[in-house]
Amino acid sequence: MSETLKEFALALSKVRSATVVAHMRPDGDTLGSALSLSVVLRSLGIRNEVVCESVVPDTFLSLPGAREIKKEPTFDAEAIVCVDCSDENRTGALADWLIRSKHKKFNIDHHVSNTRFGDYNYVRTCSANCQNMAELYRLLGAEVDKDAANLLMVGLLTDSGSFTHSDVDAETMRTAAFLLERGADISGLTYHLFRRQRKERFLLNTRIMAKARFALDDRLAFIAVTQDDLAAVGAKQEMTEGFVDYPLTVDSVEVSVALLEVKKRTYKVSLRSKGTVNVNEVASCFGGGGHVLASGCMVFGELEEVIDKLTYAVSQRL
């Protein structure tokens, strides 16, 4: 069932221990949500740990608590709290454990495609799930300290495109102001998240953008990152975060698609839209989902086959 945030907060306040789950291939919003929740739960005397099946990208390793994230639970907590996860499969290798668990499951998210898989669900679409988290902490009566404020700001900055996406509204900015008042360093975070990168990422970026492809009268753009590309410059998969946004800077492009070869014939697909195309509908064709302007899925096959499938799906919505 779905609850109001007040009901969600009341139920969460009654647990004595929790496993906080971030989604696979974590971004700033899931990490900001999970790590700030860990800080807040500790302040309320609730034992907890954060788990994520994937390696935390280098960009986020300096965040408070990031190096303590576990690959799987190390103790049997009373409750499981999934943050920024549209469905159980978004947790990757943890999905089987999550589905089998008989413990209370809390699901707090901002994706329109969320399946309400928890025993307690709060799903509200907004710029970033960290907006929902900030309001949750208010209802829990918890103090948001400087660490929690910075963690929440990471989610706002990354998921809103530094407050440039069309779903940014007055509430987004009020949340940002609330976090600034509590010590969030928006200037320092912006530099760390967006204005610095390792040489390997820079080389990978130039290599991938040089091979960009266009279709549907240049309204659709593709970039593809293969295992060979990563090996050629010594880069890691997580260094591709944000690549999908670059083709949208081309005037004619309405939809940008980034393909990441995770293994042979298996591609992680990230989709971005300027608004003409609902990419959540495109992703749902392949069992994925997300937002109207930003979604993802997995597509299987040879590279050209994958591109053809996605081109057709987008063409039906342009």
Image (tube, rainbow, N blue to C red):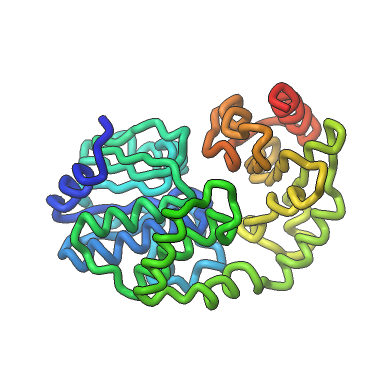
The residue lying toward the viewer, choosing from 277 and 299, is 277
Residue shown at 56%/68% (left/top)? 59
- Using the image, determine if residue 147 lies above or below residue 307: below
Q: Is residue 163 left or right of residue 171?
A: right
Residue 49 x/y as whole percent: 30, 60
- Using the image, determine if residue 204 lies above or below residue 288: below
The residue lying toward the viewer, choosing from 164 and 257, is 164
Residue 202 x/y as whole percent: 75, 67
Residue shown at 35%/46% (left/top)? 82
The residue lying toward the viewer, choosing from 107 and 231, is 107
Q: How many marks?
A: 0
**Residue at the top extreme?**
316
Q: Tell me which corner region of the image, top left, top right, bottom left or bottom right, holds residue 314.
A: top right
Quarter of the image with the C terminus in it:
top right
Residue shown at 42%/34% (left/top)? 114
Residue 144 x/y as whole percent: 29, 68
Q: Tell me which corner region of the image, top left, top right, bottom left or bottom right, holds residue 93.
A: top left
Q: Tell me which corner region of the image, top left, top right, bottom left or bottom right, holds residue 299.
A: top right
**Residue at the front extreme?**
170
Residue 302 x/y as whole percent: 76, 33
Residue shown at 82%/42% (left/top)? 252
Quarter of the image with the N terminus in it:
top left
Q: Is residue 134 left or right of residue 78?
A: right
